């Protein structure tokens, strides 16, 4: 719950406290939190934080996705030492900002930038030594474009580096490179498991689906153990887990109406999970999937039907009505659910603490 000035004004209008007490209380709370360490380092949208994140993303993309072919001229040893120099420099400056100057966000982002140099360092070392799990994968920029088993060590090294950094720097954005590399690994493991020349889209989708499920389970366990008010360490795992799971679904089903209906039910299940886990991401992915299925029905199954749009209109209005009723009576609904759902089951649901 966030307390705003309007809340105290409301309490004064309701004569719970006097207007003078509301003014004194607001001034006291403002003085207390504006000078606290938690307030100074709380993630919020302002120019300073925008500059921190925007600058960090430019550096990460410049040394990754946007890296040109000309960098290959440095050779494996050159790329390795450049990446290591970047990582050490970012870590030293990040240590100063985070631990000595109490600039947690900017310092943490520099540690994140250091972690994001690990794939380039491992790539350079592998190119230098000539050691690859499978065949030579090509230039470094291909890491972000092509599915190849030889990238796996780069992803594994980045995950390990991020986990070690998280032990000392409690920063939720550090889970982003972990989730990103897990997502890539779900694709790059496919040619290792099924053979470089024998894997197809269905095999790739199967591995991706199971990786997505594992990511979602890990994110859920993190959600149970941590307080979101102290940092949302599960968000990025939820995001990339959903990417991996959700995008694999269309490739796993057969070309039958039952398979498509099951796809719709799965997406409806994601919407239900969004309510239970208090995660909007599940609702977004689930809603897109349901609309995709309805679009298929409209353009393929009921293309000549006059009644189908009317039926969808009635369905949409019914859902809006249910939403209105829920908003009016949600407190009574929550009390009822608390009575009927056992405490053991309620403890299995994350809380926005």
Image (cartoon, rainbow, N blue to C red):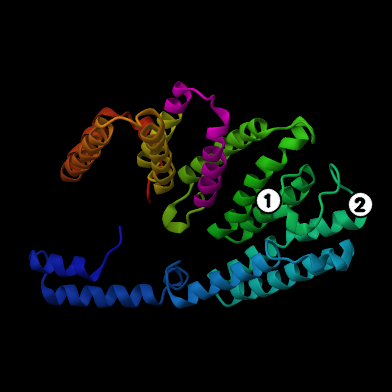
Inspect the magenta stretch and tell me whether residue 70 lies in it: no
Q: Can you tell which quarter of the image residue 26 is in?
A: bottom left
Give the residue displayed 49% in from the left and 51% down from the top: 235
Q: Position of residue 158 (x, y in %)?
A: 71, 54
Image height check: is 234 above or below 257?
below
Q: In this view, does 45 lie to the left or right of 94?
A: left
Q: Is mark 1 on a helix, strand or loop?
A: helix
Instruction: Name the one closer to the observer, 230 or 257.
Output: 257
Tell me the distance, in whole angstroms, between the alpha carbons under discs 2 and 1. Answer: 22 Å
Q: Earlier in the sequence, mark 2 or mark 1?
A: 2
Q: In this view, does 270 lie to the left or right of 65?
A: left
Q: Give the range drawn in magenta.
A: 235-262
Outermost residue toward the front in this view: 304
Q: Position of residue 343 (x, y in %)?
A: 34, 32
Which SS type dominates the magenta stretch?
helix
Q: Is residue 239 left or right of residue 58?
A: left
Q: What element carries label 2?
A: loop
- Which of the numbered marks, if any, corresponds to residue 130? 2
Inspect the magenta stretch and tell me whether residue 243 lies in it: yes
- Which of the numbered marks, if any, corresponds to residue 255? none
Give the residue displayed 54% in from the left and 24% down from the top: 254
According to the picture, the residue beneath numbered tag 1 turns out to be 159
Q: Can you tell which quarter of the image residue 175 is in?
A: bottom right
Q: Is residue 348 visible?
A: no
Q: Position of residue 300 (x, y in %)?
A: 41, 31
Number of numbered callouts drawn = 2
Q: Can you tell which quarter of the image residue 162 is in?
A: bottom right
Instruction: Name the one closer to the observer, 38 or 177.
Output: 177
Check if mark 2's residue and mark 1's residue have beta carbons within 8 Å: no
Q: In this view, does 83 lie to the left or right of 23?
A: right
Give the residue displayed 48% in from the left and 54% down from the top: 232
């Amino acid at each position: 719950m966030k307390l705003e000035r309007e809340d105290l004004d409301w309490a004064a209008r309701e004569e719970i406290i006097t207007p003078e007490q509301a003014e004194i209380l607001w001034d006291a709370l403002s003085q207390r939190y504006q000078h606290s360490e938690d307030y100074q380092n709380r993630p919020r949208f302002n120019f300073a934080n925008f500059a921190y994140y925007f600058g960090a993303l430019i550096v990460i993309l410049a040394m990754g996705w946007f890296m040109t072919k000309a960098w290959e001229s440095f050779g494996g040893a050159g790329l390795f030492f450049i990446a290591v120099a970047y990582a050490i420099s970012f870590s030293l400056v990040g240590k100063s900002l985070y631990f000595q100057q109490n600039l947690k966000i900017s310092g943490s982002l520099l540690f994140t930038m250091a972690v994001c140099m690990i794939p380039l360092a491992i790539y350079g070392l592998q190119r230098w030594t000539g050691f690859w799990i499978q065949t030579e994968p090509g230039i470094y920029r291909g890491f972000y474009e092509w599915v190849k088993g030889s990238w796996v060590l780069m992803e594994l090294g980045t995950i390990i580096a991020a986990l070690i950094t998280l032990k000392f720097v409690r920063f939720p954005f550090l889970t982003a490179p972990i989730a990103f590399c897990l997502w890539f690994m779900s694709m790059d493991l496919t040619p290792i498991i099924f053979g470089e020349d024998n894997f197809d889209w269905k095999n790739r989708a199967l591995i991706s689906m199971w990786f997505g499920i594992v990511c979602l389970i890990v994110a859920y366990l993190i959600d149970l153990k941590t307080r979101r008010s102290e940092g949302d360490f599960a968000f990025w795992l939820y995001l990339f887990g959903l990417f991996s799971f959700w995008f694999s679904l269309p490739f796993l089903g057969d070309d039958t109406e039952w398979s498509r209906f099951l796809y719709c039910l799965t997406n409806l299940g994601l919407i239900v999970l969004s309510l239970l886990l208090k995660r909007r991401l599940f609702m977004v992915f689930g809603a897109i999937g349901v609309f995709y299925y309805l679009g298929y029905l409209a353009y393929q199954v009921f293309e000549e039907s006059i009644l189908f749009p009317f039926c969808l209109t009635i369905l949409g209005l019914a859902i809006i009505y249910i939403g209105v009723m829920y908003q009016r009576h949600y407190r009574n609904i929550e009390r009822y659910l608390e009575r009927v759902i056992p405490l053991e089951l309620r403890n299995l649901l994350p809380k926005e603490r």
